[in-house]
Image (cartoon, rainbow, N blue to C red):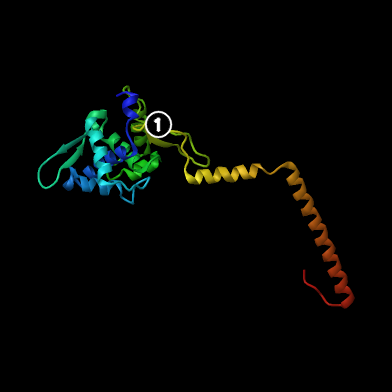
Amino acid sequence: MDDNFLSEFSLLETRVLGVLVEKQRTVPDIYPLTLNALVSGCNQKSSRDPIMNASLADVRSALDNLKHKALVTETSGGRADRFSHHIERVLKIPSPSVALIAMLMLRGPQTAGELRINSERLHKFADISSVESFLEELTERQEGSLVVKLPRQPGSRENRWMHLLSGMPETYSDPATERREMHHAIECTVTESDFAELKSRVMHLETELAALKQMIEILSTQTNFPVKQ
């Protein structure tokens, strides 16, 4: 698979693929999925990032594109057409890797630890090292990398991973990181003269406080009225 193929996937197309993988493994009784079930899965409020509001027409269009790439098959019969995925065969990756890709498509960038927890219903990894091993394999594929390790964010102890089915990502930053960076930028705007002025004001207040304590002691002596400090 070449880079042009990878870069052709839209956010909704990857969401559709992720939903198909997820529902295949969590609710096999209703798989392959109907169009209505797919729309509900794409617009699900939990376990999704970002939250979507795709229409039937939007999902149908995404399915048509995925069918053209041989990643989805439509089967007729019964009261509604149904759809199934072929990620393992087309991308030539094992079942555990499919689970990881699906989680990245459904929930966005995640650490290996988060992926292990979030993918538990799709595939149970023995430990985080096992997750990282499969991620490294997806990175080093001869046909082209399917995931990338993102630069570690300020304040984070682990790197996040992101899928490449929509092409190489731009610099990624979540809202919490942006707030930390903004706070740091504000701190950096304090100049040396600002610090000197603040220090001078503190010293002035300390002098005034000492003078006030001395006056209280004098008054206490003159009036013979003890004052607790």
Label 1 crowd bin: few (<14), some (14–19), many (20+), radius 10 Å? some
* Position of residue 75 in the picture relative to residue 23 (left or right): left
Whether residue 123 is visible to the viewer of this picture, yes or no, is no
The reply, left or right, for residue 222 in relation to residue 194 is right
Can you name the residue that lies furthest to the bottom here?
224
What amino acid does circle 1 point to?
A: Val
Residue 90, given in percent of the width and then of the height, sits at 24, 29
Q: Hey, which residue is sitting farthest top in the picture?
A: 142
Q: Is residue 229 above or below residue 160?
A: below
* Residue at the right extreme of this rendering: 222
Disc 1 is placed on an element classified as: strand
User: Residue at label 1?
Assistant: 148
Of residue 72 and residue 222, the one placed in the foreground of this image is 72
Q: Residue at x 79, y 50 (%)?
A: 200
| Front-lying residue, 224 or 21 | 21
Image position, residue 50 (x, y; %) = 38, 45
User: Which quadrant is home to the N terminus?
Assistant: top left
* Relative image position of residue 30 (x, y in whole percent): 17, 47
Q: Is residue 115 visible?
A: yes
Q: Residue at x 40, y 36 (%)?
A: 161
- Give the vertical position of 222 relative to 27 (above or below): below
Choose between 41 and 59: the one closer to the eye: 59
Residue name at image x 33 percent, y 25 percent = 4
Left or right: where 215 falls relative to 116: right
Q: Is 46 drawn above or below residue 174 in the view shown?
A: below
Most extreme residue toward the front is: 57
